[in-house]
Image (spheres, grey):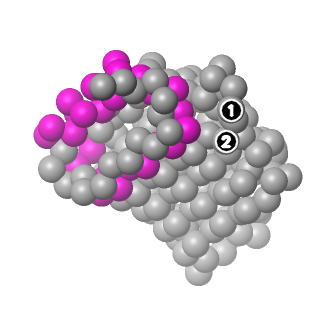
């Protein structure tokens, strides 16, 4: 990661492994703090990653000025661990255009829900650059979905929203 942090030509960083751990994401987060060349970040099939790893990525993105595309597919997370990631959307001149997040765990206690969705909605109100938002396999329910929908009423740039497999959203 130290070498990647110094690389001034790498525009896409991807890590796809079922063996990826929180420690690996902590290192990726540190790399993002100093590498402003990476524009696209993709972490996939990271079954062992928990909220700690997600939080590390979010913290790294808070100091990054260039990542436009974020795709994270991790094992489990929580409301609290999503806050740094969602906070990146409302930082001044946030470059993020696409955010895709999927939790793989089947345990409801291991997926984020309404509290994180409400926080996301507050950050969306300050962001006018996001074009794509995909949230999959979460515990977002009616309260969180309503907050997101209300925030998007004034977010005219968003052209794609997917809330897939959010089984707590009702009619």
In 3D space, how far apart are the residues under numbered discs 1 and 2 (Cα atoms)?
7 Å
Q: Secondary structure at mark 2?
A: loop
Reply above or below: 118 against 88.
above
Please count the marks in the image. Answer: 2
Determine whether, in the image, residue 34 is placed left or right of residue 91: right
* Residue linked to disc 1: 106
* Residue linked to disc 2: 104
* Quadrant assignment, res 145: top left
Magenta-drawn segment: 127-154
Determine whether, in the image, residue 136 is placed left or right of residue 46: left
Q: Position of residue 96 (x, y in %)?
A: 39, 55
Q: Is residue 46 magenta?
A: no
The crowding category of the residue bearing disc 1, from other C-alpha atoms within 10 Å (few below 14, some 14 to 19, many at least 20), is few
Q: Position of residue 114 (x, y in %)?
A: 44, 21
Visible residue check, residue 19: yes
Determine whether, in the image, residue 164 is placed left or right of residue 16: left
The crowding category of the residue bearing disc 2, from other C-alpha atoms within 10 Å (few below 14, some 14 to 19, many at least 20), is many
* Quadrant assignment, res 53: top right
Reply above or below: 119 against 42.
above
Q: Quadrant of the C terminus?
A: top left
The answer to which of 42 and 89 lies nearer the viewer is 42
Q: Secondary structure at mark 1?
A: loop
Label annotation for residue 156: none
């Amino acid at each position: 990661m130290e070498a990647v942090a110094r690389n001034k030509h790498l525009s896409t960083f991807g890590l796809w492994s079922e063996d990826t751990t929180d420690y690996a994401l902590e290192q990726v987060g540190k790399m993002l703090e100093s590498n402003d060349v990476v524009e696209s970040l993709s972490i996939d099939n990271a079954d062992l990653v928990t909220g700690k790893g997600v939080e590390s990525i979010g913290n790294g993105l808070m100091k990054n000025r260039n990542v436009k595309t974020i795709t994270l597919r991790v094992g489990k997370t929580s409301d609290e661990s999503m806050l740094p990631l969602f906070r990146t959307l409302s930082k001044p001149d946030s470059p993020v255009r696409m955010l895709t997040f999927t939790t793989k765990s089947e345990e409801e206690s291991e997926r984020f829900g309404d509290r994180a969705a409400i926080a996301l909605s507050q950050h969306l109100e300050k962001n006018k650059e996001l074009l794509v938002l995909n949230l999959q396999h979460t515990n977002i329910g009616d309260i969180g979905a309503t907050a997101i929908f209300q925030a998007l009423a004034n977010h005219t740039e968003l052209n794609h929203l997917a809330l897939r497999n959010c089984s707590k959203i009702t009619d």
